[in-house]
Image (spheres, rainbow, N blue to C red):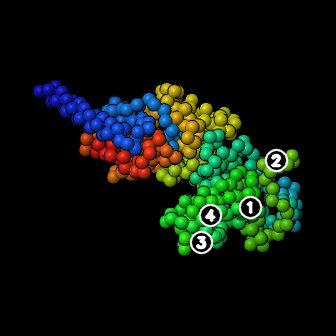
Amino acid sequence: MKNITVLFLLSLQVFAAQSISQKLDKATKELMSSSAAYSANLTFFVSDNAGNLIYEFNGNKGLSTASTQKIFTAAAALETLGKDYKYTTTASYNGNISNNELVGDLIITSNGDPTLGSWRYEGYKPEDFQKKLLAALKEKSIGKISGDIVIDDTYFDFQTIPGGWPWDDLGNYYGAGVWSVNWRENQFDLNIYGDKFKNFNIDLRGVKWVNQLKTGGNSDQSLVFTAPLSDAAYINGTLPAGKTTTVSGATPNPPLQLAVEIEDALKKAGISFNGKLITNSQNLLNGQKIISSPKNNIFFTYNSPELEKIVFWFLRKSVNLYGETLIKTMAKEKRGEGSFEVGVDFLKNFWKAKGIKSEMINFADGSGLSPQNYVSARAEVQALLYAKKQNYFPEFYDGFPTQGNGMKMKSGTIKDSKSFAGYLKSKSGDYVFSIIINNYSGNNVSNALYKVLNVLK
Protein backbone atom coordinates (compact mmCIF):
# COMPACT_ATOMS: atom_id res chain seq x y z
CA MET A 1 0.00 0.00 0.00
CA LYS A 2 2.88 2.38 0.85
CA ASN A 3 4.49 1.79 -2.56
CA ILE A 4 1.19 2.40 -4.32
CA THR A 5 0.80 5.72 -2.48
CA VAL A 6 4.30 6.85 -3.48
CA LEU A 7 3.67 5.92 -7.10
CA PHE A 8 0.37 7.80 -7.03
CA LEU A 9 2.03 10.96 -5.66
CA LEU A 10 4.81 10.75 -8.24
CA SER A 11 2.23 10.36 -10.97
CA LEU A 12 0.43 13.46 -9.76
CA GLN A 13 3.71 15.45 -9.80
CA VAL A 14 4.52 14.27 -13.32
CA PHE A 15 1.00 15.15 -14.49
CA ALA A 16 1.24 18.61 -12.89
CA ALA A 17 4.63 19.22 -14.52
CA GLN A 18 3.29 18.14 -17.89
CA SER A 19 0.29 20.42 -17.46
CA ILE A 20 2.50 23.42 -16.58
CA SER A 21 4.80 22.61 -19.49
CA GLN A 22 1.89 22.54 -21.92
CA LYS A 23 0.54 25.84 -20.62
CA LEU A 24 3.98 27.44 -20.85
CA ASP A 25 4.39 26.20 -24.40
CA LYS A 26 1.03 27.67 -25.38
CA ALA A 27 1.77 31.05 -23.73
CA THR A 28 5.29 31.19 -25.21
CA LYS A 29 4.11 30.43 -28.74
CA GLU A 30 1.38 33.04 -28.42
CA LEU A 31 4.01 35.58 -27.40
CA MET A 32 6.32 34.71 -30.29
CA SER A 33 3.48 34.74 -32.84
CA SER A 34 2.44 38.27 -31.85
CA SER A 35 3.18 41.12 -34.24
CA ALA A 36 5.49 42.78 -31.69
CA ALA A 37 7.71 39.67 -31.66
CA TYR A 38 7.89 39.42 -35.46
CA SER A 39 11.68 39.85 -35.45
CA ALA A 40 12.32 38.99 -31.79
CA ASN A 41 14.55 36.30 -30.31
CA LEU A 42 13.63 34.52 -27.07
CA THR A 43 15.44 32.18 -24.71
CA PHE A 44 13.37 30.68 -21.89
CA PHE A 45 14.15 27.95 -19.37
CA VAL A 46 12.27 26.68 -16.31
CA SER A 47 13.28 23.97 -13.85
CA ASP A 48 12.10 22.78 -10.47
CA ASN A 49 14.24 23.24 -7.35
CA ALA A 50 16.04 19.97 -8.03
CA GLY A 51 17.07 21.12 -11.49
CA ASN A 52 14.59 18.93 -13.38
CA LEU A 53 13.46 20.49 -16.65
CA ILE A 54 9.94 21.86 -16.67
CA TYR A 55 10.03 23.77 -19.95
CA GLU A 56 12.43 25.38 -22.40
CA PHE A 57 12.22 27.43 -25.55
CA ASN A 58 15.58 28.00 -27.23
CA GLY A 59 17.08 27.36 -23.80
CA ASN A 60 20.66 27.28 -25.10
CA LYS A 61 20.42 30.41 -27.28
CA GLY A 62 22.66 33.26 -26.16
CA LEU A 63 21.03 36.69 -26.08
CA SER A 64 21.86 40.09 -24.59
CA THR A 65 21.01 39.66 -20.92
CA ALA A 66 20.74 43.23 -19.60
CA SER A 67 20.91 43.25 -15.78
CA THR A 68 20.18 39.56 -15.17
CA GLN A 69 23.91 39.32 -15.92
CA LYS A 70 24.33 40.52 -12.33
CA ILE A 71 23.35 37.12 -10.89
CA PHE A 72 26.60 35.63 -12.22
CA THR A 73 28.73 38.44 -10.77
CA ALA A 74 26.97 38.54 -7.39
CA ALA A 75 27.19 34.81 -6.69
CA ALA A 76 30.81 34.58 -7.87
CA ALA A 77 31.83 37.55 -5.70
CA LEU A 78 30.13 36.13 -2.59
CA GLU A 79 31.92 32.82 -3.08
CA THR A 80 35.29 34.20 -4.21
CA LEU A 81 35.67 37.13 -1.83
CA GLY A 82 33.40 36.00 1.01
CA LYS A 83 30.25 37.70 2.24
CA ASP A 84 32.22 39.48 5.02
CA TYR A 85 34.78 41.01 2.62
CA LYS A 86 35.36 44.73 3.12
CA TYR A 87 37.09 47.37 1.00
CA THR A 88 39.64 49.64 2.66
CA THR A 89 40.48 53.32 2.21
CA THR A 90 43.46 54.86 4.03
CA ALA A 91 45.00 58.25 4.71
CA SER A 92 48.75 58.66 5.09
CA TYR A 93 51.38 61.31 4.57
CA ASN A 94 54.89 61.83 3.35
CA GLY A 95 57.27 64.24 5.03
CA ASN A 96 56.84 64.88 8.74
CA ILE A 97 54.62 66.50 11.35
CA SER A 98 56.10 69.35 13.35
CA ASN A 99 54.44 72.03 15.50
CA ASN A 100 50.93 71.03 14.36
CA GLU A 101 51.98 71.26 10.72
CA LEU A 102 52.17 68.44 8.19
CA VAL A 103 55.22 69.32 6.14
CA GLY A 104 54.33 67.07 3.24
CA ASP A 105 51.37 65.68 1.33
CA LEU A 106 48.13 64.20 2.61
CA ILE A 107 47.60 60.98 0.60
CA ILE A 108 44.31 59.11 0.21
CA THR A 109 44.30 55.64 -1.33
CA SER A 110 41.72 52.89 -1.75
CA ASN A 111 41.35 49.42 -3.21
CA GLY A 112 38.27 50.43 -5.17
CA ASP A 113 35.59 50.78 -2.48
CA PRO A 114 32.42 51.45 -4.53
CA THR A 115 30.52 52.54 -1.41
CA LEU A 116 32.91 55.34 -0.38
CA GLY A 117 30.67 58.36 0.18
CA SER A 118 27.52 56.44 -0.82
CA TRP A 119 24.17 57.63 0.52
CA ARG A 120 22.75 54.09 0.78
CA TYR A 121 24.37 52.98 4.04
CA GLU A 122 23.76 54.43 7.46
CA GLY A 123 27.06 55.56 8.95
CA TYR A 124 28.88 55.54 5.60
CA LYS A 125 27.63 58.74 4.00
CA PRO A 126 30.01 61.45 2.66
CA GLU A 127 29.84 63.45 5.89
CA ASP A 128 30.61 60.32 7.94
CA PHE A 129 33.83 59.70 6.02
CA GLN A 130 34.83 63.36 6.26
CA LYS A 131 34.17 63.53 10.02
CA LYS A 132 36.28 60.45 10.66
CA LEU A 133 39.12 61.75 8.50
CA LEU A 134 39.06 65.12 10.28
CA ALA A 135 39.05 63.36 13.66
CA ALA A 136 42.11 61.35 12.62
CA LEU A 137 43.90 64.56 11.54
CA LYS A 138 43.04 66.15 14.87
CA GLU A 139 44.38 63.12 16.74
CA LYS A 140 47.67 63.62 14.86
CA SER A 141 47.57 67.30 15.90
CA ILE A 142 47.59 68.44 12.28
CA GLY A 143 46.28 72.02 12.00
CA LYS A 144 48.08 72.91 8.80
CA ILE A 145 49.06 71.04 5.64
CA SER A 146 51.86 72.66 3.70
CA GLY A 147 51.93 70.07 0.91
CA ASP A 148 49.26 68.81 -1.50
CA ILE A 149 46.22 66.55 -1.30
CA VAL A 150 47.09 63.47 -3.35
CA ILE A 151 44.57 60.83 -4.37
CA ASP A 152 46.41 57.60 -5.16
CA ASP A 153 44.10 55.97 -7.70
CA THR A 154 46.50 53.27 -8.95
CA TYR A 155 45.10 50.06 -7.42
CA PHE A 156 43.18 49.04 -10.56
CA ASP A 157 44.21 49.71 -14.14
CA PHE A 158 43.10 52.98 -15.75
CA GLN A 159 40.36 51.69 -18.04
CA THR A 160 37.30 52.93 -16.19
CA ILE A 161 34.59 51.82 -18.66
CA PRO A 162 34.13 48.24 -19.94
CA GLY A 163 34.47 47.84 -23.69
CA GLY A 164 31.14 47.73 -25.49
CA TRP A 165 29.17 50.15 -23.32
CA PRO A 166 27.03 52.45 -25.52
CA TRP A 167 28.13 56.08 -25.67
CA ASP A 168 24.58 57.21 -24.84
CA ASP A 169 24.92 55.53 -21.42
CA LEU A 170 28.37 56.67 -20.30
CA GLY A 171 27.53 60.13 -18.97
CA ASN A 172 24.41 59.05 -17.11
CA TYR A 173 24.50 57.87 -13.49
CA TYR A 174 23.94 54.22 -14.42
CA GLY A 175 26.94 54.40 -16.79
CA ALA A 176 29.42 55.64 -14.18
CA GLY A 177 32.86 54.09 -14.57
CA VAL A 178 35.03 52.25 -12.05
CA TRP A 179 38.04 53.92 -10.46
CA SER A 180 40.54 52.80 -7.86
CA VAL A 181 39.12 55.61 -5.72
CA ASN A 182 35.37 55.98 -6.15
CA TRP A 183 33.32 58.70 -4.48
CA ARG A 184 29.54 59.19 -4.05
CA GLU A 185 29.06 56.20 -6.38
CA ASN A 186 30.67 58.42 -9.05
CA GLN A 187 27.39 60.25 -9.46
CA PHE A 188 26.23 63.87 -9.32
CA ASP A 189 22.74 65.39 -9.31
CA LEU A 190 21.78 68.42 -11.38
CA ASN A 191 18.55 70.32 -10.67
CA ILE A 192 17.05 71.84 -13.82
CA TYR A 193 14.01 74.09 -14.07
CA GLY A 194 12.48 73.52 -17.47
CA ASP A 195 15.60 73.58 -19.63
CA LYS A 196 17.68 75.92 -17.40
CA PHE A 197 20.30 74.78 -14.88
CA LYS A 198 19.54 75.64 -11.23
CA ASN A 199 22.26 73.97 -9.15
CA PHE A 200 24.41 70.90 -8.57
CA ASN A 201 24.52 68.83 -5.39
CA ILE A 202 28.34 68.90 -5.51
CA ASP A 203 31.01 71.27 -6.80
CA LEU A 204 32.03 69.85 -10.20
CA ARG A 205 35.01 72.13 -10.30
CA GLY A 206 36.33 73.01 -13.76
CA VAL A 207 33.67 71.15 -15.78
CA LYS A 208 32.33 73.16 -18.73
CA TRP A 209 28.78 72.47 -19.92
CA VAL A 210 27.01 72.62 -23.27
CA ASN A 211 23.27 72.70 -22.61
CA GLN A 212 21.03 71.84 -25.57
CA LEU A 213 17.99 70.82 -23.57
CA LYS A 214 14.50 71.61 -24.78
CA THR A 215 11.19 71.57 -22.91
CA GLY A 216 8.48 69.14 -23.87
CA GLY A 217 6.61 66.05 -22.75
CA ASN A 218 5.78 64.92 -19.23
CA SER A 219 8.89 62.92 -18.32
CA ASP A 220 12.66 63.11 -18.22
CA GLN A 221 13.95 62.35 -21.72
CA SER A 222 17.37 63.90 -21.25
CA LEU A 223 20.80 62.38 -21.81
CA VAL A 224 24.01 63.46 -20.10
CA PHE A 225 27.34 63.00 -21.86
CA THR A 226 30.53 63.06 -19.77
CA ALA A 227 33.78 61.19 -20.34
CA PRO A 228 36.47 60.00 -17.89
CA LEU A 229 39.04 62.70 -17.07
CA SER A 230 37.34 65.19 -19.41
CA ASP A 231 36.34 68.70 -18.36
CA ALA A 232 33.68 68.93 -21.10
CA ALA A 233 30.07 67.87 -20.47
CA TYR A 234 26.98 67.91 -22.66
CA ILE A 235 23.26 67.45 -22.05
CA ASN A 236 20.45 67.20 -24.58
CA GLY A 237 16.93 65.83 -24.92
CA THR A 238 13.73 67.14 -23.34
CA LEU A 239 12.43 67.88 -19.84
CA PRO A 240 8.95 68.95 -18.72
CA ALA A 241 8.33 72.71 -18.78
CA GLY A 242 7.45 74.67 -15.64
CA LYS A 243 8.92 72.27 -13.09
CA THR A 244 12.23 71.26 -11.55
CA THR A 245 13.69 67.92 -12.61
CA THR A 246 16.71 66.27 -11.00
CA VAL A 247 18.97 64.67 -13.57
CA SER A 248 21.78 62.38 -12.37
CA GLY A 249 25.03 62.03 -14.28
CA ALA A 250 28.39 60.28 -14.10
CA THR A 251 31.17 62.25 -12.41
CA PRO A 252 34.00 62.62 -14.94
CA ASN A 253 36.81 62.45 -12.34
CA PRO A 254 35.69 60.93 -9.01
CA PRO A 255 39.17 60.86 -7.40
CA LEU A 256 39.57 64.58 -8.07
CA GLN A 257 36.03 65.19 -6.79
CA LEU A 258 36.98 63.53 -3.51
CA ALA A 259 40.03 65.81 -3.27
CA VAL A 260 37.80 68.88 -3.86
CA GLU A 261 35.47 67.86 -1.04
CA ILE A 262 38.33 67.04 1.34
CA GLU A 263 39.76 70.51 0.67
CA ASP A 264 36.40 72.08 1.52
CA ALA A 265 36.12 69.98 4.70
CA LEU A 266 39.61 71.02 5.81
CA LYS A 267 38.81 74.70 5.41
CA LYS A 268 35.52 74.39 7.29
CA ALA A 269 37.38 72.63 10.11
CA GLY A 270 39.95 75.43 10.28
CA ILE A 271 42.85 73.33 8.97
CA SER A 272 45.07 75.52 6.82
CA PHE A 273 45.69 74.25 3.29
CA ASN A 274 46.84 76.11 0.18
CA GLY A 275 48.34 73.31 -1.87
CA LYS A 276 47.29 71.59 -5.07
CA LEU A 277 44.77 68.81 -5.65
CA ILE A 278 46.54 65.92 -7.37
CA THR A 279 45.53 62.47 -8.61
CA ASN A 280 48.03 59.86 -9.68
CA SER A 281 46.06 59.17 -12.85
CA GLN A 282 46.63 62.80 -13.82
CA ASN A 283 50.31 62.44 -12.93
CA LEU A 284 50.54 59.55 -15.38
CA LEU A 285 48.77 61.54 -18.08
CA ASN A 286 51.18 64.43 -17.56
CA GLY A 287 54.24 62.21 -17.49
CA GLN A 288 54.90 63.00 -13.83
CA LYS A 289 55.99 60.74 -11.01
CA ILE A 290 53.47 58.66 -9.08
CA ILE A 291 53.20 59.71 -5.45
CA SER A 292 52.85 56.52 -3.44
CA SER A 293 51.31 56.04 -0.02
CA PRO A 294 53.97 55.32 2.66
CA LYS A 295 52.67 52.32 4.63
CA ASN A 296 54.52 53.34 7.79
CA ASN A 297 52.71 56.70 7.83
CA ILE A 298 49.12 55.45 7.57
CA PHE A 299 47.13 57.16 10.32
CA PHE A 300 43.54 56.53 9.21
CA THR A 301 41.85 53.34 7.97
CA TYR A 302 38.25 53.31 6.79
CA ASN A 303 36.40 50.09 5.93
CA SER A 304 33.36 49.64 3.69
CA PRO A 305 30.18 47.77 4.63
CA GLU A 306 30.39 43.98 4.27
CA LEU A 307 30.14 42.52 0.78
CA GLU A 308 26.77 40.94 1.57
CA LYS A 309 25.33 44.44 2.03
CA ILE A 310 26.95 45.64 -1.19
CA VAL A 311 25.49 42.67 -3.07
CA PHE A 312 22.06 43.45 -1.63
CA TRP A 313 22.03 46.90 -3.24
CA PHE A 314 23.78 45.59 -6.35
CA LEU A 315 20.85 43.26 -7.00
CA ARG A 316 18.01 45.24 -5.44
CA LYS A 317 18.74 48.58 -7.18
CA SER A 318 20.85 47.22 -10.06
CA VAL A 319 23.90 49.42 -9.38
CA ASN A 320 26.15 48.89 -12.41
CA LEU A 321 29.14 50.50 -10.68
CA TYR A 322 29.11 47.71 -8.09
CA GLY A 323 29.17 44.98 -10.72
CA GLU A 324 32.14 46.39 -12.58
CA THR A 325 34.01 47.03 -9.32
CA LEU A 326 33.42 43.42 -8.26
CA ILE A 327 34.75 42.24 -11.63
CA LYS A 328 37.99 44.19 -11.11
CA THR A 329 38.21 43.19 -7.44
CA MET A 330 38.00 39.47 -8.21
CA ALA A 331 40.60 39.93 -10.93
CA LYS A 332 42.96 41.78 -8.58
CA GLU A 333 42.46 39.46 -5.59
CA LYS A 334 42.73 36.19 -7.52
CA ARG A 335 44.96 37.00 -10.48
CA GLY A 336 46.86 40.09 -9.39
CA GLU A 337 45.60 42.39 -12.16
CA GLY A 338 42.61 44.67 -11.65
CA SER A 339 41.31 44.93 -15.21
CA PHE A 340 38.01 44.26 -16.95
CA GLU A 341 39.63 41.81 -19.35
CA VAL A 342 41.06 39.65 -16.57
CA GLY A 343 37.90 39.98 -14.45
CA VAL A 344 35.53 38.91 -17.22
CA ASP A 345 37.78 35.95 -18.04
CA PHE A 346 37.87 35.00 -14.35
CA LEU A 347 34.07 35.18 -14.15
CA LYS A 348 33.62 32.97 -17.20
CA ASN A 349 36.07 30.38 -15.90
CA PHE A 350 34.40 30.43 -12.49
CA TRP A 351 31.09 29.38 -14.02
CA LYS A 352 32.66 26.94 -16.46
CA ALA A 353 34.10 25.17 -13.40
CA LYS A 354 30.54 24.90 -12.04
CA GLY A 355 29.43 22.97 -15.11
CA ILE A 356 28.00 25.70 -17.36
CA LYS A 357 29.03 25.33 -20.99
CA SER A 358 31.29 28.17 -22.11
CA GLU A 359 29.27 28.65 -25.31
CA MET A 360 26.30 29.79 -23.19
CA ILE A 361 28.16 32.46 -21.17
CA ASN A 362 29.79 34.95 -23.49
CA PHE A 363 30.33 37.69 -20.89
CA ALA A 364 31.36 41.26 -21.73
CA ASP A 365 31.00 42.94 -18.32
CA GLY A 366 29.78 42.35 -14.77
CA SER A 367 26.56 44.38 -14.80
CA GLY A 368 24.81 43.66 -18.08
CA LEU A 369 24.91 47.20 -19.47
CA SER A 370 26.92 46.02 -22.47
CA PRO A 371 24.76 44.65 -25.31
CA GLN A 372 27.73 42.37 -26.08
CA ASN A 373 26.81 39.99 -23.24
CA TYR A 374 25.35 36.86 -24.84
CA VAL A 375 23.99 34.39 -22.29
CA SER A 376 21.36 31.66 -22.47
CA ALA A 377 18.39 31.20 -20.16
CA ARG A 378 19.62 27.68 -19.34
CA ALA A 379 22.92 29.14 -18.09
CA GLU A 380 21.13 31.63 -15.85
CA VAL A 381 18.99 28.88 -14.33
CA GLN A 382 22.07 26.74 -13.75
CA ALA A 383 23.72 29.66 -11.91
CA LEU A 384 20.60 30.25 -9.81
CA LEU A 385 20.40 26.54 -8.93
CA TYR A 386 24.09 26.49 -7.98
CA ALA A 387 23.74 29.55 -5.72
CA LYS A 388 20.74 27.93 -4.02
CA LYS A 389 23.02 25.21 -2.61
CA GLN A 390 25.66 27.57 -1.19
CA ASN A 391 25.96 28.96 2.33
CA TYR A 392 25.69 32.54 1.04
CA PHE A 393 22.30 31.88 -0.59
CA PRO A 394 20.21 33.74 2.06
CA GLU A 395 22.17 36.95 1.38
CA PHE A 396 22.08 36.37 -2.38
CA TYR A 397 18.34 35.67 -2.38
CA ASP A 398 17.57 38.65 -0.15
CA GLY A 399 18.83 41.03 -2.83
CA PHE A 400 16.30 39.89 -5.43
CA PRO A 401 13.36 42.30 -5.74
CA THR A 402 9.83 40.90 -5.52
CA GLN A 403 8.10 41.69 -8.81
CA GLY A 404 5.15 40.51 -10.86
CA ASN A 405 2.92 39.66 -7.90
CA GLY A 406 5.21 37.46 -5.87
CA MET A 407 8.11 36.48 -8.10
CA LYS A 408 11.50 36.90 -6.45
CA MET A 409 13.50 37.86 -9.49
CA LYS A 410 16.12 40.11 -11.03
CA SER A 411 15.03 42.11 -14.04
CA GLY A 412 17.08 43.63 -16.82
CA THR A 413 16.46 46.36 -19.38
CA ILE A 414 18.67 47.80 -22.08
CA LYS A 415 17.74 49.00 -25.56
CA ASP A 416 15.66 46.31 -27.29
CA SER A 417 16.34 43.74 -24.54
CA LYS A 418 14.31 42.64 -21.50
CA SER A 419 14.98 39.83 -19.06
CA PHE A 420 13.75 38.24 -15.83
CA ALA A 421 15.48 35.54 -13.80
CA GLY A 422 14.78 34.21 -10.34
CA TYR A 423 12.72 32.00 -8.07
CA LEU A 424 9.02 31.39 -7.62
CA LYS A 425 7.09 29.50 -4.96
CA SER A 426 3.55 28.84 -6.12
CA LYS A 427 0.60 26.50 -5.68
CA SER A 428 1.76 24.39 -8.60
CA GLY A 429 5.35 24.04 -7.31
CA ASP A 430 8.67 25.77 -6.75
CA TYR A 431 10.45 26.98 -9.87
CA VAL A 432 13.72 28.49 -11.01
CA PHE A 433 13.45 30.39 -14.28
CA SER A 434 15.02 32.75 -16.78
CA ILE A 435 13.45 34.48 -19.75
CA ILE A 436 15.27 36.88 -22.10
CA ILE A 437 13.87 38.58 -25.18
CA ASN A 438 15.73 40.73 -27.70
CA ASN A 439 14.39 42.98 -30.46
CA TYR A 440 10.78 43.03 -29.27
CA SER A 441 9.11 46.02 -30.93
CA GLY A 442 6.18 46.73 -28.57
CA ASN A 443 6.10 49.12 -25.62
CA ASN A 444 4.67 46.60 -23.16
CA VAL A 445 7.38 43.94 -23.27
CA SER A 446 7.36 43.49 -19.48
CA ASN A 447 3.63 42.72 -19.50
CA ALA A 448 4.14 40.30 -22.38
CA LEU A 449 6.76 38.38 -20.38
CA TYR A 450 4.67 38.52 -17.19
CA LYS A 451 1.84 36.89 -19.10
CA VAL A 452 4.10 33.92 -19.82
CA LEU A 453 5.59 33.71 -16.31
CA ASN A 454 2.17 33.98 -14.67
CA VAL A 455 1.45 30.48 -15.95
CA LEU A 456 3.80 29.23 -13.22
CA LYS A 457 1.58 30.62 -10.48
Which disc is residue 285 wearing?
Answer: 2
The residue under label 1 is: 207
The residue under label 3 is: 193
**Above or below, 160 relative to 93:** above
The residue under label 4 is: 213
**Which badge, 2 or 1, comes first in the chain's sequence?**
1
Image point 42% across, 51% down: which residue? Answer: 443
Residue 29 visible in the shown view: yes
Asked which secondary structure carries label 2, the reply is helix
Q: What amino acid is labelled 1 in the image?
A: Val
**Quarter of the rendering occupied by the N terminus:** top left
Query: Disc 3 or disc 2, which is closer to the eye?
Result: 3
Labels 3 and 1 touching (C-beta < 8 A) = no
Asked which secondary structure carries label 4, the reply is strand
Q: Position of residue 360 (x, y in %)?
A: 49, 30
In three-dimensional space, the C-alpha distance between marks 3 and 1, rounded to whole angstroms, equals 20 Å
Q: Nearer the viewer, residue 450 or 321?
A: 450
